[in-house]
Amino acid sequence: MNILESKKIKEKAYLEKLDNGMTVIIIPKPNLDKKYIIWGTHFGSIDNRFIMPKTGEEVFIPDGVAHFLEHKMFEQPNGTNSLDTLMALGLDANAYTTNDHTAYLFECTDNFYEGLDELMDYVQHPYFTDENVEKEKGIIAQEIKMYDDEPGWRLYMNAMDCMYKENPIKIDIAGSVESINKITPDVLYKCYNTFYNPSNMIMAVCGDFKPEELLQEIKKRLIPKEEQGKITRIYPEKEMTINKPYKEDKMEVSIPLFAIGYKDIEGMDNEKDIVKKHIAIEILLNMIIGKSSENYKKLYEAGELLAEPDLDYEFSKEYAHVVISGKSKNPQVIKNAVENTVEEFKNKGLNEEHFDRIRKKVYGDYVVEYNSVGNIARMFLADNIKGINSFDYIEEFNSVTKKYTEEILKNVFKSENMILSVINCK
Amino acid sequence: MYYEKKELKKGITIHQINTNKFKTNLFSVFLAIPLERENVTKNALIAAVLRRGTQNLKSQDEISKKLEEMYGASFDCGIEKTGDNHILKFYLESISEEFLPEKEELSKKCLQILFDIILNPLIENDGFKEEYIESEKRNLKQIIESKIDNKRIYSLERCIEEMFKDSPYGLYKYGYVEDLEKINAKDLYKYYKELISRCKIDIFASGTIENLDIYKIIEENEQIAKLKERTPEYIVNKQKAEKINEKEERIVEEHLNVGQGNLVLGLKVNDDKENGKYIASVYNAILGGGANSKLFQNVREKESLAYTAGSNYKRQKDAIFIRCGIEIDKYEKALNTIKVQLTDMKEGKFSEEDINNAKQLINSSIKSINSEQDTEITYYYGQELSEQFVRIEEYMKKIEEVSKNDIEHLANSTFIDTIYFLRN
């Protein structure tokens, strides 16, 4: 196996690309009782148009299929549900769908190999019928309605709508009540057969394991599958501008919610530098409006902010953006403060002492990620799908200089790519 | 791993959890005081004001800067209800010294800052700083009002409020807007001094602390040295449920502009058996603990009525809360389906397999307690408040001992107290 190592935090990851194309990553944690396994496929809500490698057929699917498929994977031909089986073993099992991947997982202290049997069995055996697909529509409709009542989710979706015209990141991960009604077993099988091929899948495991032994156990449980060619995913053309600078909605909330976004047009174009860029953006966000920033101090004292905003940089090959979100009675004031600070930083350069302090903080944040087996496995999976080695966040940290960060500031934080999404009180 | 506790002075206890499972050290201080309408708002405000500044670090901004320099050590504080106690919680987490790029005495600095924040606040004219009080009052008002923002949490809070209307547990942990207006900087400081001298204080240190003499560092801390011994007034969480008479269920309906209905049922567990709390845990797990529970299987999987369907057991209050998000016009059907599950529990319509699954679910979460630093601290603090020390192994054994008879018996003395429904 290939060994990746971070000397700074004394961790190793063992990586193997199997003959069938599947990637296995094992991160040993010798003294922990908890174990965590996650098996993901590079298939998320944005993959709504693609060419099936075997038949060459172009498929355009309804919104919410990846998520629907995730729900349906647990159902077995003998009438059992794998989620129940896993829970009965005392394992904490779950699954989730994001923009770019779907993942099946469990966490446990005992019965790991019994759980592995079940996990690898159900993910490799789809069973969709008219009846069981129909039944799921009621459950997912309630999930969609739960999100519809969540102001934070609506705020985020509106921010995406501001930044993108056609990009499928605008699509709600679960789809809509109308779109899920169009889903049939046939659509599910087409997607399963395309995206659940081992060559499109990654498994990450963290806990007290001997990597070589575990790898053999995983291999034993894999069903031979025919090699398929490359999946061609069809996405709309890259958009060089934002869709609209502002969007507002009204909901039953006690105080308005805001999301300020900067669309990053360049995104992952310069792929090999993406980790450095990500680190630089996190430092910048903390300097602009983080807990110890001038901005936060002023806005907090003036009663404009109640708590430090959430700071996030989301990216894939298809989209990239910064989102700053929080609560304030005057969202426009927050937006102006952010914009002015960005301009000031561009003109005067970053303050050396401030930059160094925030660097230390961001470094500490990355180290803390390694406290939990769940965090570690999820991080390695999500990063691997983007082509990133997670340790790079620690190892490349020192190469992020003030000068480099200033360049990123100029390239990413542009006023013309700035948007504001607001949820006002009804 | 070892856990050790030692009384520093009467009413002040130091707990040490030495573990090498983490990259961080976590220090926390808990102040416990009985929940009272008169004081809830003040307690919540105190937690907020303390983080604003100390005599040494005069503003939040100075505190943040200091922590950032310490490799992003992070401070957090919060307020919680545990049984009939109001708990002010303060945490400071920092990277273990072995993972620092350069050698530094981080732990000692961390404890100093933490104690400074709690015990050495910025004082002006014999009161808290006026400006901080005013802005924290404004903030707290907003926090109290934002209860409504998350409809699922709101529904649960409302059900608890209705069910425990006339008892301390029904109080909102952040307090009340109408009480806020009456508070001023001087009076609050007076109350704070009283609080600090009366409350139960527990100090936890978790991490690779073997080679640090934590006890000595704490004992010698200037702020800690000033504390006097006390007979703390906190309420001990009882081991047995109190026997109460079954009442008729109360239905509370509330209208808000929502798309989904939130149904919450508050159940009272009325079984005063020895080990009743362990039996109730197993009962709750069968009823609504996970994916193979009765609620999940029937309300969600069979009837397709909900995405979320399950229940939670509040051990200190002998209460179980059933929660589901449903189509508003399916209220009757959902309620009936839930009631059928409760009847099935009473009639013993559950198998040995169900019982074993439930026990597995509970014991695997108990077993993983030491895989998360704050969970481990919470476990030991829970024991501290109930004045009983149960080792993890013993806890699991007691769960194993629960029998079908025990569960049936408990099911028959469990009843619906309040039905709360949030709809449009």
Image: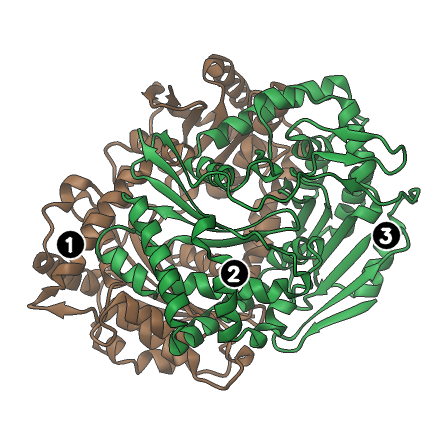
Chain colours: A green, B brown
Height in image: A30 above or below A73? below
Name the spot of residue A302 as percent of width and height, x first.
21, 54
User: Where on the picture, by quarter, is residue A396?
Assistant: bottom right
Tell me how far mark 1 sits from mark 2, CA to CA: 41 Å
Of the numbered discs in the image, which one, if any, rests on residue B134? 1
Q: The disc labelled 3 sits on which kind of residue?
A: Gly
Q: Secondary structure at mark 2?
A: helix
Q: The disc labelled 2 sits on which kind of residue?
A: Asn
Of the numbered discs in the image, which one, if any, rests on residue A21? 3
Q: Do marks 1 and 3 both belong to one polypeptide chain?
A: no
Name the spot of residue A235 as percent of width and height, x first.
69, 39
Q: Secondary structure at mark 1?
A: helix
Residue at the image point whose x is 31% and y is 59% from the top: A296
User: Is A419 displayed left or right of A386 in the figure?
Assistant: left
Q: Mark 2 sits on what residue?
A: A411
- Chain letter of the residue beneath label 3 in the structure image: A
User: Is A238 displayed left or right of A192 in the figure?
Assistant: left
Tell me how far mark 2 sits from mark 3, CA to CA: 36 Å
Residue furthest bottom in the image = B103
Residue depth check, mark 1 versus mark 2: number of the one nearer the observer: 2
Considering depth in this image, is B42 or A186 the residue closer to the camera?
A186
